[in-house]
């Protein structure tokens, strides 16, 4: 049991857990989500099947993994994968924004992946 919560709080939350979602959980879920396993449900979404499978193996068993991308509409979508693996998106990156706020040599899309959502 986590020492971060008193036993009385754990008993209250066990039947009504905190639900956390990590969308784009490449290389594992956000670390602070893992602090309270007995009072939380964690759902991780990573659209790249191989990355999702690898992350699932490395993560605690209470994290539920889905090799899906999330969008407000369904159908065929283009997934823009960045060179450094961060900032991947279903939204086409704007080159001028990346040049202004990031490192264009590592953050420009290098691969377009077509997905069915």
Image (cartoon, rainbow, N blue to C red):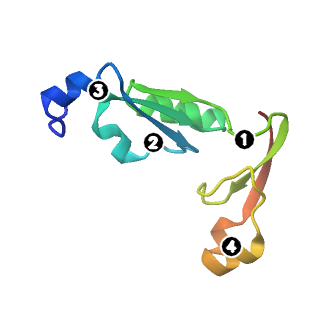
Given the current orientation, which residue lies at the most extreme bottom position?
Answer: 100
Label 2 sits on a secondary structure element that is loop
For disc 4, the marked residue is 98
**Foreground disc of the pair 3, 4:** 3
Of callouts 1 and 2, the N-terminal one: 2
Dots 3, 4 in contact, CB < 8 A: no
Category of crowding for the residue at label 3, using alpha-carbon neighbours closer than 10 angstroms: few (below 14), some (14–19), many (at least 20): some
For disc 1, the marked residue is 71
Of callouts 4 and 1, the N-terminal one: 1
User: Tag on residue 1?
Assistant: none
Of callouts 2 and 3, the N-terminal one: 3
Q: CA distance from mark 3 to mark 4?
A: 42 Å
User: Tag on residue 29?
Assistant: 2
Looking at the picture, how far across and down is residue 81, in whole percent?
70, 53
Q: CA distance from mark 1 to mark 2?
A: 19 Å
Category of crowding for the residue at label 2, using alpha-carbon neighbours closer than 10 angstroms: few (below 14), some (14–19), many (at least 20): many
Task: Please tell me which residue is depicted at 78% across the width and 58% down the height of the picture.
Answer: 92
Q: CA distance from mark 4 to mark 1?
A: 22 Å
Q: Quadrant of the N terminus?
A: top left
The answer to which quarter of the image holds residue 7 is top left
**Foreground disc of the pair 2, 3:** 3
For disc 3, the marked residue is 13
Q: CA distance from mark 1 to mark 3?
A: 30 Å
Q: Is residue 62 above or below residue 33?
A: above
Of callouts 4 and 2, the N-terminal one: 2
Of callouts 3 and 4, the N-terminal one: 3
Category of crowding for the residue at label 1, using alpha-carbon neighbours closer than 10 angstroms: few (below 14), some (14–19), many (at least 20): few
Label 4 sits on a secondary structure element that is helix
Q: Quadrant of the C terminus?
A: top right
């Amino acid at each position: 049991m986590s020492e971060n919560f008193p036993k009385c709080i754990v008993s209250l939350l066990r039947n009504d857990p905190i639900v956390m979602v990590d969308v784009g959980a490449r290389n594992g879920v956000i670390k602070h989500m893992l602090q309270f396993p007995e009072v939380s449900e964690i759902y991780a979404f990573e659209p790249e099947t191989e990355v999702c499978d690898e992350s699932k193996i490395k993560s605690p068993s209470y994290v539920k993994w889905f090799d899906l991308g999330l969008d407000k509409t369904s159908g065929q979508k283009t997934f823009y994968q960045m060179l450094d693996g961060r900032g991947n998106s279903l939204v086409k990156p704007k080159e001028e924004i990346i040049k202004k706020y990031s490192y264009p040599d590592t953050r420009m899309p290098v691969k377009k992946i077509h997905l069915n959502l």
